[in-house]
Image (cartoon, coloured by chain):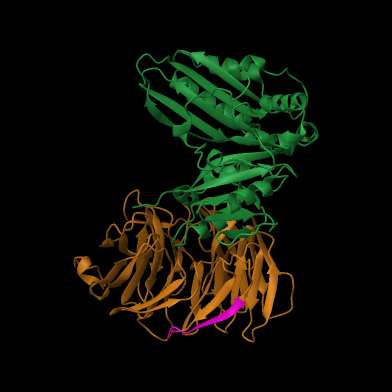
């Protein structure tokens, strides 16, 4: 595969400017080409190649985090609510905790949902019981392990892994001073990666044998995206696309990153690895979207969306790329011609 | 087309100083504005229109080798969440606990890029209990730090105080921070126009660095005693050499950063037609050219430090050495 010279804009299926922050985009399961755009005002838009076909008001005033859940998505907000919206647009209130500022959410394939407010992590089990954990510091990110049995939470002072399925009370702690935000676990379950307030990644081997700090980023690393087999991790935070290798025993610890120049002095805020190839979509602070290839080429998809790109997601089959920005511009690109 | 940055007002003050009363006053006044309020504990605040967020103050050190570079992790989280809403708030009010150091709150606005992009620290308001402040300043370092950080100080309970009592409290405040605006209040009763939208942290607003009350030569006597918070103002006529000033300033904040609470300056550099202004909290300092020096305006530099156990002589000598 190689990048063609097709001009970019002809492939944009729709582009809308609504001035409503795009919190996240979910590529829906079981429905290969439909996306849910979760927006900062509490609304969810379902859209595909024909444009928007449904708008749902899930939360009253705001929506702080979203993740995939069954055939739809689950969202949380500062109204203390956790709400599931299915593919047909039907909403179900799962939890209401007045006064809670839920701003992180994760779901597991077996139906568990975790959300956090500061140090408090609440895990909703499929039978609707709730387990509450108190983390050692303010939680900055949640992610279930690939098996789904454990929940990883980044926090002030490191990260913790909780055994949510059992009564084991004490989490497995990974300690490193500072505030940890977005968190991810490698698809093979060997590595834990967090993004820190100090513009660095921290990487631990899950078995505690090694850990390391990956610094040198000029801005905070807001997006982490795995290559399909988990051999590489693409990261935002620089004006180059930074890719860390994870195919050796210690992963990137002691290794150099691959750096693919994208657009000078326009720092990346979103990255999304194509589900089937070595292409990586990137979005920047100035609202530029690029399609980069791991061999080092980068091609402009769309320029100047007006505000930082906050979400970027490939459809399950990898034909469509959905994007959304901080100040509301969002849309869909058909990328078939690029492959 | 970026929206205007949302102004953030910090309400601080020692235990029982009237912070919650002030907060209620702001929220219940008929101003038609919508605020988000970040408090440590849901107190007796009853509000319909506004959003109240309860948080545990969570302070952490930045891993940049500076022990005074502390920020409020919980605020970063909450402020970033609030900025996702469609209609932003007219303002955000943060009430600290009575024993809190305002520095991590202020530094959060210097250190986090997303917060810098969408919000701005407007003003730190320190409420003080006039009846007890002198005692508190003697025994509680927190109370001193709060007075030192205030852009505005509300001296409560002045209706219950005799004139000489008031004047001794004022003197105690003035010794720590003569640059704050001081209001005598009863139950934090004050016009909102005097405390909101003050732009106290805008470099543009650094117009003069004159003490706001009492005269400079009225400066209180010096005590040699641990944990002394004082302010020093230096004034030099003529121009400074930037190639000497900036390295000196950097070395000062690097070595004395933990002890310097606030810094403000208006500076005149040689071969520079513009007035340079700077301000900082501990080691975080920012500066910019503000406007051209006017014709006939006297070229002079003023530098103010508010801090703990600072050596006035040393600072003065260093600053003087920057003169052309």
> Does the magenta segment cover residue A291?
no
Position in image of residue B9 (x %, y %): 56, 45
Q: Is residue A182 above or below residue B223?
A: below
- Quadrant where the image shows the N terminus of chain A: bottom left
Residue B16 image position (x, y, % from top left): 75, 44
Q: Is residue A212 visible?
A: no
B148, A278: nearer the viewer: B148
Colour-to-chain, green: B
Residue B66 x %, y %: 61, 40
Q: Residue at position x 51%, y 39% from top? A: B198
Q: In the figure, is residue A267 to the left or right of B236?
A: left
Q: Quadrant of the C terminus of chain A?
A: bottom left
Q: Nearer the viewer, residue B227 or A263?
A: B227
Residue at 52% over, 70% down: A186
Badge count: 0
Q: Quadrant of residue A225?
A: bottom left
Q: Is residue A337 left or right of residue A214?
A: left
Question: Is A93 included in the stretch rendered in magenta?
Answer: yes
Vertical placement of residue B176 versus A171, above or below: above
In this rendering, the answer to whether A212 lies above or below B160 is: below
Q: Residue A260, position in %: x, y?
A: 35, 57
Q: Which residues are magenta?
A: A87-95
Relative to B88, is A164 above or below? below
Q: Is A141 in front, or is A91?
A: A91
Q: Quick check: can you spot residue A316? A: yes
Q: Residue at x 70, y 27 (%)?
A: B170
Is B197 situated left or right of A334 in this image?
right
In orange, which chain?
A: A
Q: Quadrant of residue B212?
A: top right
């Amino acid at each position: 595969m190689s990048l063609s010279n097709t001009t970019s804009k002809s492939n944009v299926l729709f582009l809308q400017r609504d001035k409503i922050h795009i919190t996240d985009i979910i590529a829906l399961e079981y429905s290969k080409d439909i996306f849910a755009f979760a927006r900062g005002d509490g609304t969810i838009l379902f859209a595909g190649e024909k444009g928007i076909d449904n708008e749902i008001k899930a939360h009253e005033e705001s929506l702080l985090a979203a993740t995939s859940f069954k055939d739809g998505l689950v969202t949380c907000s500062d109204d203390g609510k956790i709400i599931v919206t299915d593919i047909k647009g039907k909403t179900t209130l799962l939890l209401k905790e007045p006064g809670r500022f839920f701003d992180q959410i994760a779901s597991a394939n077996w139906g568990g949902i975790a959300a956090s407010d500061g140090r408090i992590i609440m895990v909703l089990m499929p039978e609707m019981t709730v387990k509450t954990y108190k983390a050692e510091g303010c939680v900055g990110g949640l992610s279930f392990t690939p098996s789904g049995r454990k929940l990883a939470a980044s926090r002030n002072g490191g990260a913790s892994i909780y055994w949510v399925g059992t009564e084991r009370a004490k989490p497995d702690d990974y300690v490193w001073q500072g505030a940890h935000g977005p968190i991810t676990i490698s698809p093979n379950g060997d590595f834990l990666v967090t993004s820190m307030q100090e513009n660095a990644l921290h990487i631990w081997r899950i078995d505690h044998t090694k850990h390391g700090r990956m610094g040198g980023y000029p801005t905070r690393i807001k997006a982490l995206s795995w290559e399909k087999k988990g051999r590489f991790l693409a990261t935002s935070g620089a004006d180059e696309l930074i890719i860390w290798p994870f195919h050796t025993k210690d992963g990137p610890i002691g290794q150099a990153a691959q750096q693919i120049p994208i657009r000078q002095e326009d720092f990346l805020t979103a990255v999304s690895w194509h589900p089937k190839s070595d292409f990586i979509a990137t979005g920047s602070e100035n609202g530029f979207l690029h399609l980069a290839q791991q061999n080092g080429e980068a091609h402009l998809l769309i320029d100047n969306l007006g505000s930082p790109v906050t979400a970027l997601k490939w459809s399950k089959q990898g034909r469509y790329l959905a994007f959304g920005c901080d100040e509301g511009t969002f849309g869909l690109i058909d990328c078939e011609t690029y492959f | 087309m970026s929206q205007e940055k949302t102004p953030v007002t910090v309400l601080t003050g020692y235990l029982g100083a009237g912070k919650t009363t002030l907060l209620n006053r702001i929220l219940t006044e008929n101003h038609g504005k919508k605020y988000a309020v970040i408090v440590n504990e849901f107190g007796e605040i009853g509000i319909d229109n506004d959003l109240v967020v309860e948080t545990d103050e969570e302070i952490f050190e930045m891993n940049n080798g500076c022990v005074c570079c502390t920020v409020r992790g919980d605020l970063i989280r909450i402020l970033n969440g609030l900025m996702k809403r469609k209609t932003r708030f007219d303002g955000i009010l943060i009430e600290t606990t009575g024993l809190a150091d305002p520095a991590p709150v202020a530094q959060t606005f210097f250190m986090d890029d997303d917060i810098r992009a969408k919000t701005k620290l407007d003003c730190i308001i320190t409420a003080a209990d006039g009846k007890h402040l002198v005692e508190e300043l003697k025994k509680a370092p927190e109370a001193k730090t709060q007075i030192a950080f205030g852009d505005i100080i509300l001296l409560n309970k002045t209706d219950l105080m005799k004139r000489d009592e008031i004047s001794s409290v004022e003197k105690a405040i003035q010794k720590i921070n003569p640059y704050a605006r001081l209001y005598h209040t009863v139950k934090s009763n004050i016009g909102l126009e005097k405390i909101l939208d003050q732009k106290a942290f805008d470099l543009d607003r650094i117009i003069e660095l004159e003490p706001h009350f009492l005269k400079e030569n009225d400066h209180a006597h010096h005590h040699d005693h641990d944990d002394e918070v004082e302010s020093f103002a230096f004034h030099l006529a003529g121009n400074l050499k930037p190639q000497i000033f900036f390295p000196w300033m950097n070395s000062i904040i690097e070595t004395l950063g933990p002890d310097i609470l606030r810094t403000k300056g208006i500076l005149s550099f040689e071969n520079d037609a513009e007035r340079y202004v700077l301000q900082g909290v501990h080691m975080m300092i920012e500066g910019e050219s503000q406007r051209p020096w006017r014709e006939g305006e006297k070229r002079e530099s003023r530098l103010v430090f508010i801090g703990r156990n600072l050596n006035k002589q040393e600072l003065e000598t260093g600053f003087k050495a920057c003169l052309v």
